[in-house]
Amino acid sequence: MRALASYREAFSVAVRSMLSSKLRSFLTLLGVILATATLIVVMSIVHGMDVYVAEQVSDMGPDGFQVQRIPLVGDFDPKKLIELDRRNPKLTAEEFQYLKSHLTLVREFGMEASRGVTVRYREQDLEAVDMDGVSANMGVISYISVASGRFILDIDNQRHMPVVFIGEDVRARFFPDREPIGKTIKLDGVPFEVIGTAAKRGSVLGFSRDNFVMIPIGTYFKTFGAHADLSFSGLALDRDRLNDAQDEVRVLLRSCRRLRPNQEDNFGLLASASLVELWDRLTKILATMAVGIVSVFMVVGGVVIMNIMLAVVTERTYEIGIRKAVGARRQDILRQFLIESSLLSASGGLFGVALAWLLVVGVRAGTSMPMAVPPSAVLVAVGLTALVGLFFGVYPAQRAAKLDPIHALRWER
């Protein structure tokens, strides 16, 4: 009980000391506040993007994968990418048909070709729109929701029908207050009839995911050429057999391309888990850099706190002398100043948390940036600031504890 009362008294004295010099306390903590706010904002961006990538960006789901000409994951090496671009042949429609007819662990397997186009309706143009030529099952594979009308059907591909499925950006630009189904738009001057619209998917870091149109892959080949750079997408029978399905695709495609056992794959396989893993590696680097930079500011803030605490020890030398004269021990004085410096620094951390929360709320309200404050960031920030105050408060506290009571009592005489 005595120890608890001693801590309670030390905490009360520390609070009164802080409140008695509000401006000095605020200026002392300014660096800690800004460092804490910066740390939490960066961690909020990283956490928000982690959640967003895991839930939405990949568009493949937990059991989906893609076959690509050049692998997108792994260590970034510009020279290797140039070599792969030169060495890896394009995926072909014949290879797609071969894989589709031999796969046993895949419930859906689709094909896609992409290019940029200018979309025109009447006298209005929308440039740099992503146009995808797709097989009929790409809507299922990519988890595309239909807002109105319908998606592309097999018969559209078989008959090379000039029909188009449009994204929300295209619909909002040309048909903000009218029904687009049945209307004719032009893709690079070629007329297509709108058969459906997609539900809004949002954006990532300011880049819209709704700025697209989709046409039947057969129509794409007939109208824009059959030498497109293709990619294949598939869904495994279930999540547990995703790796087996990818292995099956790898074996079949290597066989189709007659690759020897000692030759590397001249294609790439990508699953949603791989995208998330790649993003995690990138964000860990960003988070590590942010923590390093913030730590420098924390050290600067800690030095300021140490200097202020040294000034406080000087101001309260007579008080320390009186406390020692009436029986206060060294550890009592040491505890008093350590609690005060820790409380001072932790208060800066709490103000930093509040500032960061306001910034995150403001950014989320005014932009499309996915941000979310992880509880761990708050605990780390407040804990780190308290440790900074404790560490940089040791020297002033020891100096106060070692004061000679007779010398201290003469300080103001």
Image (cartoon, helix red, strand yellow):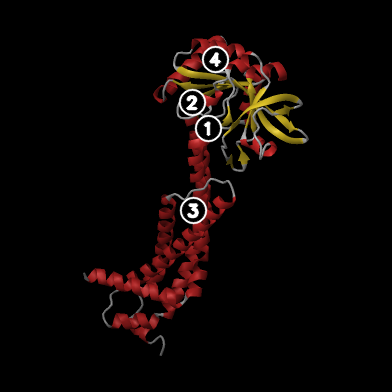
User: In this picture, is 394 found above or below 320?
Assistant: above
Are the residues tagged 2 and 1 within 8 Å (C-beta)? yes
Q: CA distance from mark 3 to mark 4?
A: 47 Å
Give the quarter of the figure containing the N terminus: bottom left
Disc 2 to disc 1, how far (Cα)? 9 Å
Of the numbered discs 2 and 3, the one sitting upstream in the chain is: 3
Nearest to the eye among marks 2 and 4: give it. 2
**Rendered location of residue 213, percent (x, y):** 65, 29
| Of marks 1 and 4, the one in the foreground | 1
Q: Residue at x 39, y 80 (%)?
A: 317
| Circle nearer the N terminus (2, 1) | 1
Residue lying furthest right: 123
Q: Taking the image as drawn, is residue 124 in sight?
A: yes
Q: Do callouts 2 and 4 mark residues in contact (Cβ within 8 Å)?
A: no
Quadrant of the rendered image containing residue 197: top right
- How far apart are the two marked residues, 2 and 4, measured between alpha carbons? 26 Å
At mark 2, the secondary structure is strand
In the image, 267 versus 61, the foreground residue is: 61
Q: Position of residue 2 (x, y in %)?
A: 22, 71
Per the rendering, the mark at residue 40 is: 3
Please report whichever mark, 3 or 4, sits nearer to the chain's N-terminal start.
Answer: 3
Q: Which mark's residue is nearer the viewer, 3 or 4?
A: 3
